[in-house]
C-alpha cells in the first residue's frame, strides 16, 4: 500500500510538479511494478487502482504538454493532445470516481479546461470515414473477434489492470464524409496548395494564441461565458443560400438559418480568473 500512497502523492502534487521525461518514465515504471504485484497476488482491485493512477498520470502529462505546445505555437499538436485527453478521461470515468469538489488530481479541472481550449481553436470541419471492419482482435487475449465467436472480454472493462478494446486489423473504407462533430477530433481538414499539392495550415489561431499568452501556467483558471446574439437576415444580404451560414454551423445558409425568423450567433466572452501576464484582455466571436 505504501507504493500506491507514494504514487498518489505524486499525482496530487501536479500543480508543483515539473518532471523531466526520465522522471516521468520512472513514475510509469513504479506504477507498472505495482500493477504486476497486484496481478501476481490476484488482487484485481489494486490492479484496477494502478491502471487508474497510470491513466491519471498520462492525462496530467498530456495536459501539461499541450499547454507547452500552445506556448510554442504548435497548435495542431496541442489539439491532438486535447483529443487524447478527452478519450482517456472518458475511459477513466468508468472506473475511477474522483472528488469533484476537492479535485485532488485536477481531473475535473482538466476536463473543463480542455473543453474551453478546444472552443478557441478554429477547426470546424473534419473528415469521418465510414468503414467496414473485416478483422479485429481482443487486446486482452489476442483472440479474433467474430459475430458468433466471443472471447468473453468486454470492451471498456479492466482485466489484470489493462483496458479491453477491440484492435482493428483489417478494414474496407466505404466512404469519407465531412462532418462538424467527429468521433475522433484529430481528423482536421486542411486546404491543399494548388501549386505544390501539399496541405497547408491557413487557420487563424488568434483566439487560442491570445489566451495562451495571458496564462502563466496550465493550472491558471479561466472560463468562457456564452451568450446568443440575434441578427436580422437583412444584415446578410451578401450571403447566398449556398454560402456557409453566418451562425457558424458550417451548413449552407439555405439549409440552416435562412428559413428561420433570424440568425442566432453564439458568442463567447473569456474571463481570466487567475493571475494574467498582461491582464484585462477580452475576446469574442468564439463559436
Image (cartoon, rainbow, N blue to C red):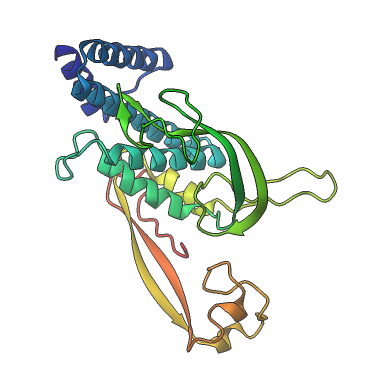
Percent from the top left, x then y, of residue 252?
62, 74
Percent from the top left, x then y, of residue 138?
45, 29
- Count every numbered label the image shows and give the total: 0
Tell me what residue is drawn at x 25 percent, y 26 percent. Answer: 48
Q: Quadrant of the N terminus?
A: top left
Q: Foreground: 125 or 238?
A: 125
Q: Foreground: 43 or 96?
A: 43
Q: Foreground: 240 or 3?
A: 3
Percent from the top left, x then y, of residue 151?
40, 30
Task: Using the rendered image of the protein, determine whether residue 16 is visible from the camera's viewpoint.
Answer: no
Tell me what residue is drawn at x 29 percent, y 11 percent. Answer: 33
Q: Foreground: 273 or 156?
A: 156
- Residue 62 to residue 253: above or below: above
Tell me what residue is drawn at x 53 percent, y 53 percent. Answer: 206
Q: Is residue 264 left or right of residue 178?
A: left
Task: Using the rendered image of the protein, determine whether residue 21 is visible from the camera's viewpoint.
Answer: yes
Residue 139 found in image quarter: top left
The residue at the far right in this view is 195
The residue at the far front in this view is 148
Q: Is residue 223 left or right of residue 120?
A: left
Residue 23 found in image quarter: top left
Tell me what residue is drawn at x 39 percent, y 43 percent. Answer: 86
Amino acid at each position: 500500500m505504501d507504493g500506491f500512497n507514494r504514487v498518489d502523492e505524486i499525482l496530487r502534487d501536479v500543480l508543483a510538479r515539473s518532471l523531466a521525461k526520465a522522471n516521468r518514465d520512472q513514475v510509469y515504471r513504479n506504477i507498472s511494478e505495482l500493477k504486476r504485484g497486484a496481478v501476481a497476488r490476484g488482487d484485481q482491485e489494486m490492479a484496477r487502482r494502478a491502471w487508474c493512477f497510470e491513466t491519471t498520470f498520462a492525462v496530467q502529462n498530456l495536459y501539461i504538454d499541450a499547454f507547452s505546445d500552445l506556448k510554442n505555437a504548435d497548435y495542431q499538436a496541442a489539439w491532438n493532445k486535447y483529443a487524447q485527453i478527452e478519450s482517456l478521461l472518458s475511459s477513466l470515468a468508468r472506473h475511477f470516481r474522483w472528488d469533484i469538489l476537492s479535485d485532488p488530481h485536477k481531473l475535473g479541472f482538466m476536463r473543463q479546461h480542455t473543453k474551453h481550449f478546444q472552443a478557441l481553436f478554429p477547426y470546424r470541419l473534419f473528415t469521418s470515414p465510414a468503414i467496414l471492419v473485416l478483422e479485429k482482435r481482443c487486446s486482452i487475449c489476442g483472440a479474433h473477434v467474430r459475430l458468433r465467436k466471443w472471447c468473453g472480454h468486454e470492451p471498456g472493462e479492466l482485466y489484470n489492470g489493462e483496458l479491453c478494446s477491440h484492435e482493428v486489423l483489417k478494414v474496407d473504407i466505404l466512404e469519407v464524409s465531412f462532418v462538424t462533430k467527429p468521433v475522433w477530433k484529430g481528423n482536421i481538414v486542411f486546404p491543399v496548395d494548388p501549386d505544390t499539392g501539399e496541405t497547408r495550415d491557413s487557420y487563424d489561431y488568434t483566439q487560442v494564441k491570445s489566451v495562451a499568452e495571458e496564462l502563466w501556467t496550465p493550472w491558471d483558471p479561466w472560463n468562457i461565458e456564452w451568450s446568443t446574439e440575434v441578427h436580422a437576415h437583412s444584415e446578410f444580404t451578401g450571403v447566398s443560400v449556398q454560402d456557409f451560414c453566418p451562425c457558424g454551423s458550417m451548413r449552407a445558409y439555405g439549409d440552416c438559418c435562412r428559413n428561420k425568423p433570424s440568425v442566432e450567433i453564439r458568442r463567447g466572452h473569456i474571463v481570466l480568473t487567475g493571475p494574467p501576464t498582461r491582464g484585462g484582455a477580452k475576446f469574442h466571436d468564439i463559436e
